[in-house]
Image (cartoon, rainbow, N blue to C red):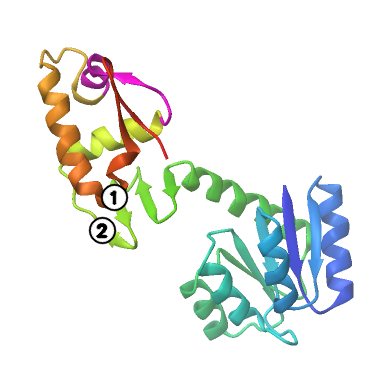
Amino acid sequence: MRILIVDDELKIREVVKEYAKVNDYLCDEASNGKEALQMIEKENYDCIILDIMMPELDGFSTLKHIREKSDVPIIMLSARQEEYDKLFSFDNGVDDYVTKPFSPKELMARIKVVSERNKKESSEKYVFDDLVLDVLGRSLKIEGKNIELTPKEMDLLIYLVQNKGIALSRDKLLQGVWDRDYYGDDRTVDTHIKMLRRSLGKYRDCIVTVRGMGYKFEI
């Protein structure tokens, strides 16, 4: 796991990096928010430790820029203990808030918790450019707008996406989406595919017809 520690205090960065190494984490450092954003453009991180009070670009501004593009877990690490700062942080997408002075061992434990939670949540979401399918929430967004699907259309889309790139026969779709004992015909699948494509708008062509067989979801 690769983490990024963003803090203008060298001693803090050194301590976090030392404990990260003990826990088999790779750790990169940034001394301010501007430097951190440049690093995030080049590298994917599993967790970011972010200080609030920093030169050039403070933690809250850095947080805002990160959240515009990424859901990476972020832990605020700050000497500021006011309730307002904590609430503001959580309202703007922080996963955890740790105040200085802090226990490095506890920080490592918190990194593990937020990272595992994020992996679990991410596994139930599928993102393709500006199409976002939330399996647990049973919601579909395209360009940030909620797309209303019928329950069966949603079931069909989830099944197709979870089997992305795999050609699925109509019989397979009937069994997987409707019921193993469902005795409908091919027209049932074709009709729902037609309605689903209409709902997907510019992503309609992601549902590819496999001639003589069925369909597959492909980006």
Q: x and y percent of residue 38 in the render?
A: 71, 70
The quadrant in which residue 62 appears is bottom right
Question: For this rendering, which residue is in front, 168 or 63?
Answer: 168
Task: Indicate the secondary structure of the residue bearing disc 1.
Answer: strand
The quadrant in which residue 176 appears is top left
Q: CA distance from mark 2 to mark 1?
A: 7 Å
Q: Is residue 147 above or below residue 193?
A: below
The quadrant in which residue 75 appears is bottom right
Q: Is residue 174 above or below residue 4?
A: above
- Marks 2/1 in contact by CB < 8 Å: the verdict is yes
Q: Residue at x 74, y 62 (%)?
A: 4
For this view, does 141 lie left or right of residue 87? left
Q: Is residue 171 magenta?
A: yes
Q: x and y percent of residue 3 in the render?
A: 73, 56
Q: Which residue is mark 1?
A: 139
Residue 182 in sight in this render = yes
Count of numbered circles on the image: 2
Quadrant containing the C terminus in the rendered view:
top left
Sequence-wise, which precedes: disc 2 or disc 1?
Answer: 1
Residue extent of the magenta highlight:
164-176
